[in-house]
Amino acid sequence: MDKEWIAATIEKISTWGKGNRGTSRLAFSTEDWQAKEYVIDLMKEAGLTIRLDAFGNIIGRLEGSNPSAPAVATGSHLDTVPEGGDYDGIVGVVGGLAAVKQLKERGQLTHPLELIIFAAEESSRFGFATMGSKVMAGTTNLSAWSKAKDQSGVALSEALREQGFDLEGITKAVRGKQELKAFVELHIEQGPVLENDKTTIGIVAAIAAPTRLKITVEGMAAHSGTTPMDQRQDALVSAAMIILAVQEIALEQSHLGTVGTVGAMKVHPGAMNVVPGLVEMWVDIRGTNHESIIEALQDIKDAISTIAEGQDTPVAIEVLSSDKPVLMDDHIKGMIEDACRQVGVSYKRMPSGAGHDAMNMAHITAAGMIFIPCRGGISHNPEEFADTEDIVAGVDVLTETLYRLAK
């Protein structure tokens, strides 16, 4: 295993979008495409044939001795959150390529191997997560996506068109269940469990799926100096109460692994001397216990109704996405365990609190995930870091797992 190549390649990819406060390589941005072009060149050098689907997913393929056999796939994403880190997604792409290169050296396998770079995994730009893998799995909401715009007002359809892709034609990118035998994704944990337990590999048992809401609170904009306190319809006060309610309800469900976050908010008109007349806020609820998520959502809706009535500020709730938690394939989990024993690394089964492309691929093929530790459990942050030795261990386990699936 060429660990120097892995470290240097990750460092090179991180230069696209690098700023003073982390890396910003948003989906379908110039920086995103430049990083993809670089990796496409590396894939070609490794002998993979490349194709891009209608949504911009990149599929590199190494043929097996039976080209009609379903492919064994791995991969991840290259886009980041704003001011993010250098390992989320990249480890799975670079590590996946390293694994495919190692397997190529062993000689031709029966099944073809694929390395997939999924487009728009992060929800940061257009408000929808794991978009590329949803397209492959045929679980898109084209009606909602056709209205999606980024913070600058650029429509998703426009961003796609500028790079030669077509939102209206993405049904052509759906893959049939007969095309793939399995999908296995390598990823940093994005949490502290492995590091705290001094364990090298996490075998993902289930992936938490996000339910995302847009909440709009309507008040009455008014002069902050002349409007009496008892005659205000302050949308921001109601929003603050909703934020606290989300926190309290998520805490009540936290023993079941459910979490809730109000991660973004817009206040209108946004002037210091004006009582806020409108507030838009975005809420992320997720966990691996579907019943707990449903209960949390109902409690949040009930709390919002009480707050809206008490403050005389009408509230609208829009469900942006509602995905169910996804179990990873039992057979692949067992294969990963066998690979860990063969490589000689410690491992444990664990849930994933973050959503990943593997959860969508599980709709069309047997899917699994391999976690490696990240320092301090920090992710979506410039301080995000994974030790090269841990990445190499993850690649070794991935390589053995893919070999067992493709031989």
Image (tube, rainbow, N blue to C red):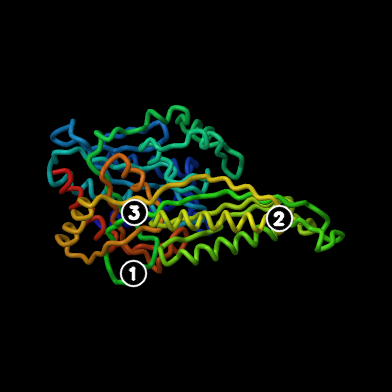
Residue ID for mark 2: 235
Q: Residue 337's spot in the image, x, y percent?
A: 19, 59
Residue depicted at 58% across the width and 48% down the height:
214
Which quarter of the rendered picture does the N terminus lie within? bottom left
Residue 190 as seen in the image, left or right of residue 6:
right
Q: Is residue 101 left or right of residue 124?
A: left
Q: Secondary structure at mark 2?
A: helix
Q: Residue at x 55, y 64 (%)?
A: 247
Percent of width and height locating residue 171: 40, 29
Upstream in the sequence, badge 1 or badge 2? 1
Q: Secondary structure at mark 3?
A: helix
In which quarter of the view is residue 239 placed?
A: bottom right
Q: Mark yes or no: residue 108 visible.
A: yes
Can you say which quadrant of the picture contains the C terminus?
A: top left
The Cα atoms of the two marked residues, 1 and 2, are separated by 42 Å
**380 left or right of 369 in image:** right
For label 2, the crowd category at 10 Å Cα-Cα, with few meaning under 14, some 14 to 19 and many 20 or more, is: many
Whether tag 1 and tag 2 are in contact, CB under 8 A, the answer is: no
Label whose residue precedes the other's in the sequence (1 or 3): 3
Taking depth in this image into account, of 255 and 398 the one nearest to the observer is 255
Circle on res. 91: 3
For the residues labelled 3 and 2, the Cα–Cα distance comes to 43 Å
Disc 3 residue crowd, few under 14, some 14–19, many 20+, Cα 10 Å: many
Q: Looking at the rendered structure, which numbered label has been put on residue 195?
A: 1
Q: Secondary structure at mark 1?
A: helix
CA neighbours of label 1 inside 10 A, class few (<14), some (14 to 19), many (20+): some
- Residue 1 in view (yes/no): no
Q: Nearer the viewer, mark 1 or mark 3?
A: 1
Query: Depth-wise, is mark 1 or mark 2 nearer the camera?
Result: 2
Q: Which of the marked residues, 3 or 2, is nearer the chain's N terminus? A: 3
Task: Name the image quarter holding residue 340.
Answer: bottom left
